[in-house]
């Protein structure tokens, strides 16, 4: 394990985090929020010192020995380090008095989960509220991808940073969209920034003030879900809710599709099978849920409006709410629960298992059925007309198994807190898939404050594992990762 | 530039790495996704899985926007079809194909318009030519040419009884009585770019620049006997052997070839009637002894197995064959092999790669990039040739008045047909070609990069 190179990248990440903290810091200066300012100063000083020490330690790091495991370890550790520093402002300002709560809150931010331990957000200082929402935006596309867009990590132009891109970006087969990793990262961020700015503009047109428009847009872009009001998005106008619905769907689409659109390669966009599955799932779920909840609303239009929003918030794994969907009948809730686990498309900012994994699994099942009918048939799994590598399918199945094991273990641990089954299951599903609210006691109108510190740490792990697609986090726990350390 | 490479084999990958380092955007096509995956995770390039001769795959790889297409798959036929297809999809593209089969090599060159080829590269033939060049002027371990072949860098080893031993470099020209310059020295695995106070020791491998004629004078004066090679023996009967035997025959060097495969022996015997073809296993010493290899004045090991080549070359060296050439297919770990007494090492893939890279540089040359780059001193030092253009600094200023970076040395300046080697009074003008030697990590991309800011 190339510890020094990992240390150097983490040092860089902390510097980047300092830079990213500056807007929120500026807001707290501007609003004269003394406690928040103190919090930010502590965090910035800590990050700078630790970052400088790490860079000093890594002075003569070997830049060439960097493989997939280093990429994964870097990603896992970076996210933990970032969250530890990111939690400092909340803790030092005493707006979240317990460090574990502050850590939970910022992990929930960076992983774009949106689960909160705060009972009440409206009284929070503006700087910290901004930092909380901005963490969604940073975590959505990934801070390492951001780092790659601005500096070359490798010696000259070596491709090893691809391992980091793979570890940080969601999806079973992450690739570059242009030959240079730096350009790939830059294109992703440009698309991300443009979409976010358009979202902010639409929100401003709806009469929202700039601060709230930014916060809500960050939450939408990162598919996070932290709001700035206690009732999430319920008190905003239907226009703003509709804009947010549309953008939640837009941000759950694979970003390479937007790049294809920019390049006018529409043919590839139209025949993208994951996109088909995603659209189909949206239509079917909206239809079924609307049919189920229609009696609860005054008109079909209103029902469709709220159902579309809820389906969007769940599929994109955002976690905003306009209605308390916990009150809906259990058929609607069951569909939402399934959608929570499936999540968004690969290569988007959303979480969950990802549409393409479901696609691969469905095709794998079909292949196995075919196999039992024609035992010697040779059939390959095609996605977008191309045969999928066995490795990718293997990876998908092992992902699912790891997913199930972690969910079950976490579920058992948090059951110690004594809540009901629905709360526990949905809390784990909601954090692991980076959604935010679950059902029952962690439903859209409730929060995660009541859990014990141990449960909160378990859920922090789940959020990180969910965002980084399990393996980078599992790797950190594996003994053999550290055994070879030189 | 945007460059598309077909084939992620050793050559394809090395070209990708070199060109990516020089700032080009590289896309690689390969039908084997595992091989491709390896290339992508190692170098900053993008990959497309598929057959490079297929129109769909080429379109997916965005051939329409490419400037150069390099076909380096293992199959000549695929390479030719690929370049034709690529050219029909984008008529402004430069196409380069690696053609290895001797049966196609000539026609590919003659019919390059039909195949839409800008450059045909034949690594085996190139290797044979390189070896022939070494054998025609024996005594050097390695020769690299610059400046339209007027200037060369050659590699020598300082032996214990050599007059070079304990010579201070500022006295070198008097000692060897030739206008030459030592531009790099490898000692105990470390590479140096020496100044005038550097003293040579036994065991040093030195890299000497000069005009070809001057280098020969030096060789004679330091007592390395350059008896012309009369009898060469080659182990292995592959494509390189075929080209080499033909070339040596042209220079009146008698050739014996040892090959194990009976069928191949017969083919060689029928195609090379002037050569002595012996059927035998070269890993068996009795075969080499039976051929009395100590009676030959050159030994060339060209079998397909690197290990076998190293061992047989060692054996030839111990038996006192004066000129030994070893072919290494993989060409890895030059630092480990560099100190073995296996004579000159040639690597076909490296030669092929450098040839293609040089061609790409020539296409791009408008930006003051290097004309030629040779890696010397086990790859730690680069000898780079630039052409002076009007943007170059310090035109017509004596070199002693300029300040170059540490570990960078201007070794020669060619002005028309006149070549000057070293010396602080030398100047250059627009159109001259300048050869610079620098440590590999010095990041010299244009001539102006050598000067201190």
Image (cartoon, rainbow, N blue to C red):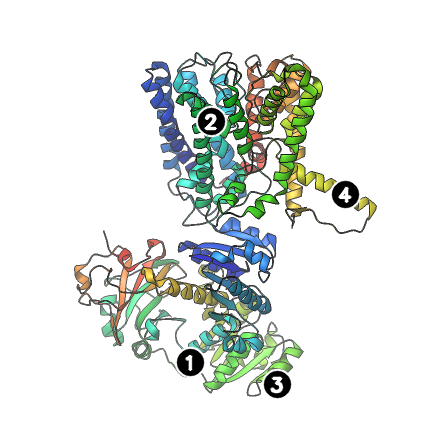
Chain for numbered disc 2: A
Q: Is residue B43 above or below residue A17?
A: below
- The image's mark for residue B136 is 1
Residue depicted at x 51% and y 62%: B11
Q: Nearer the viewer, mark 2 or mark 3?
A: 2
- The image's mark for residue A368 is 4
Label 4 crowd bin: few (<14), some (14–19), many (20+), radius 10 Å: some
Q: Nearer the viewer, mark 4 or mark 3?
A: 4
Q: Nearer the viewer, mark 4 or mark 1?
A: 4
- The image's mark for residue A466 is none
On whether disc 2 and disc 4 are found on a single subunit, the reply is: yes
The residue labelled by disc 3 is: B270
Chain for numbered disc 3: B
Earlier sequence position, callout 2 versus callout 4: 2
On whether disc 3 and disc 1 are found on a single subunit, the reply is: yes
Residue depicted at x 54% and y 77%: B107
The residue labelled by disc 2 is: A217
**Horizontal and vertical percent for residue A229?**
48, 15
């Amino acid at each position: 394990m190339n510890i020094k190179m990992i240390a150097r990248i983490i040092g860089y990440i902390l510097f980047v985090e300092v830079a990213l903290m500056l807007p929120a810091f500026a807001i707290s200066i501007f609003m004269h929020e003394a406690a928040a300012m103190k919090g930010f100063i502590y965090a910035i000083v800590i990050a700078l010192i630790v970052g400088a020490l790490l860079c000093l330690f890594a002075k003569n790091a070997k830049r060439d020995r960097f493989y997939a495991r280093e990429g994964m370890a870097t990603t896992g550790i970076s996210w933990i380090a970032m969250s530890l520093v990111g939690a400092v402002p909340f803790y030092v300002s005493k707006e979240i008095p317990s460090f574990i709560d502050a850590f939970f809150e910022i992990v929930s931010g960076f992983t774009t989960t949106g689960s909160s331990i705060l009972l009440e957000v409206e009284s929070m200082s503006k700087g910290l509220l901004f930092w909380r929402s901005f963490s969604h935006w940073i975590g959505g596309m990934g801070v390492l991808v951001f780092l790659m867009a601005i500096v070359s990590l490798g010696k000259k132009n070596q491709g090893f940073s691809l391992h980091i891109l793979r570890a940080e970006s969601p999806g079973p087969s992450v690739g570059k969209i242009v030959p240079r990793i730096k350009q790939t990262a830059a294109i992703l961020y440009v698309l991300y920034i443009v979409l976010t700015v358009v979202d902010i503009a639409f929100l401003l047109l709806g009469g929202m003030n700039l601060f709230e428009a930014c916060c809500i847009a960050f939450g939408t872009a990162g598919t996070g879900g932290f709001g700035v009001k206690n009732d999430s998005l319920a008190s905003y106008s239907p226009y703003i809710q509709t804009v947010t619905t549309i953008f939640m769907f837009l941000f759950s689409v694979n970003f390479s599709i937007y790049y294809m659109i920019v390049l006018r390669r529409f043919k590839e966009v139209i025949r993208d099978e994951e996109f088909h599955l995603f659209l189909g799932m949206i239509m079917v779920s909206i239809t079924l849920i609307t049919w189920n909840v229609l009696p609860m609303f005054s008109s079909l239009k209103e029902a469709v409006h709220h159902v579309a929003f809820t389906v969007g918030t769940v599929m994109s794994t955002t976690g905003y709410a306009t209605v308390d969907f916990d009150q809906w009948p259990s058929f609607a809730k069951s569909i939402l629960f399934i959608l929570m686990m499936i999540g968004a498309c690969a290569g988007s900012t959303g979480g969950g298992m990802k549409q393409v994994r479901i696609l691969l699994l469905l095709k794998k099942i079909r292949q196995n059925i075919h196999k039992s009918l024609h035992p010697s048939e040779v059939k390959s799994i095609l996605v977008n007309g191309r045969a999928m590598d066995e490795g990718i399918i293997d990876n998908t199945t092992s992902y699912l198994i790891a997913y199930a094991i972690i969910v079950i273990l976490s579920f058992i641990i948090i059951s110690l807190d004594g809540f009901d089954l629905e709360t526990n299951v949905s809390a784990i599903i909601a954090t692991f898939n980076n959604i935010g609210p679950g059902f029952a006691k962690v439903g859209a109108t409730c929060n995660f404050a009541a859990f014990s510190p141990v449960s909160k740490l378990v859920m922090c792990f789940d959020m990180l594992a969910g965002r980084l697609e399990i393996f980078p986090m599992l790797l950190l726990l594996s003994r053999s990762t550290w055994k070879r350390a030189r | 530039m945007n460059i598309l490479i077909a084939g992620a084999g050793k050559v394809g990958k090395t070209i990708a790495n070199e060109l990516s380092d020089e700032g080009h955007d590289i896309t690689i096509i390969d039908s084997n996704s595992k091989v491709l995956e390896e290339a992508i995770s190692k170098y900053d390039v993008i990959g497309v899985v598929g057959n490079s001769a297929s129109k769909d795959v080429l379109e997916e790889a965005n051939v329409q926007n490419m400037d150069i297409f390099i076909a380096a798959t293992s199959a000549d036929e695929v390479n030719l079809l690929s370049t034709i297809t690529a050219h029909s999809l984008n008529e402004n593209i430069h196409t380069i194909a690696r053609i290895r089969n001797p049966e196609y090599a000539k026609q590919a060159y003659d019919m390059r318009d039909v195949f839409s080829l800008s450059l045909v590269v034949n690594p085996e033939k190139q290797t044979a030519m390189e070896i022939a060049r070494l054998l025609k002027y024996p005594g050097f371990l390695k020769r690299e040419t610059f400046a339209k072949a007027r200037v060369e860098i050659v590699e020598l080893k300082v032996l214990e009884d050599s007059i070079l031993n304990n010579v201070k470099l500022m006295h070198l020209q008097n000692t060897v009585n030739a206008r030459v310059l030592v531009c790099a020295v490898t000692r105990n695995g470390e590479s140096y770019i020496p100044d005038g106070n550097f003293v040579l020791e036994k065991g040093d491998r030195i890299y000497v620049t000069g005009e070809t004629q001057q280098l020969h004078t030096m060789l004679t004066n330091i007592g390395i006997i350059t008896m012309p090679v009369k009898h060469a023996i080659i182990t292995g009967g592959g494509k390189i052997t075929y080209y080499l035997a033909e070339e040596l025959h042209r220079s009146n060097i008698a050739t014996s070839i040892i090959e194990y495969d009976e069928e191949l022996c017969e083919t060689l015997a029928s195609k090379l009637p002037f050569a002595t073809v012996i059927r035998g296993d070269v890993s068996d010493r009795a075969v080499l002894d039976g051929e009395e290899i100590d009676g030959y004045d050159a030994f060339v090991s060209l079998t397909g197995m690197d290990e076998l080549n190293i061992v047989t070359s060692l054996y030839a060296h111990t038996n006192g064959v004066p000129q030994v050439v070893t072919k290494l297919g993989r060409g890895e770990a030059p630092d480990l092999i560099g100190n073995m007494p296996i004579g000159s090492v040639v690597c076909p893939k490296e030669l092929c790669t450098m040839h293609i890279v040089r061609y790409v540089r020539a296409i791009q040359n408008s930006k003051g990039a290097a004309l030629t780059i040779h890696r010397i001193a086990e790859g730690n030092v680069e000898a780079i040739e630039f052409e002076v253009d009007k943007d170059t600094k310090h035109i017509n200023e004596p070199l002693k008045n300029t300040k170059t970076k540490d570990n960078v040395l201007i070794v020669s300046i060619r002005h028309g047909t006149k070549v000057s080697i070293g010396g602080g009074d030398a100047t250059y003008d627009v159109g001259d070609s300048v050869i610079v030697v620098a440590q590999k990590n010095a990041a010299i991309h244009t001539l102006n990069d050598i000067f201190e800011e």
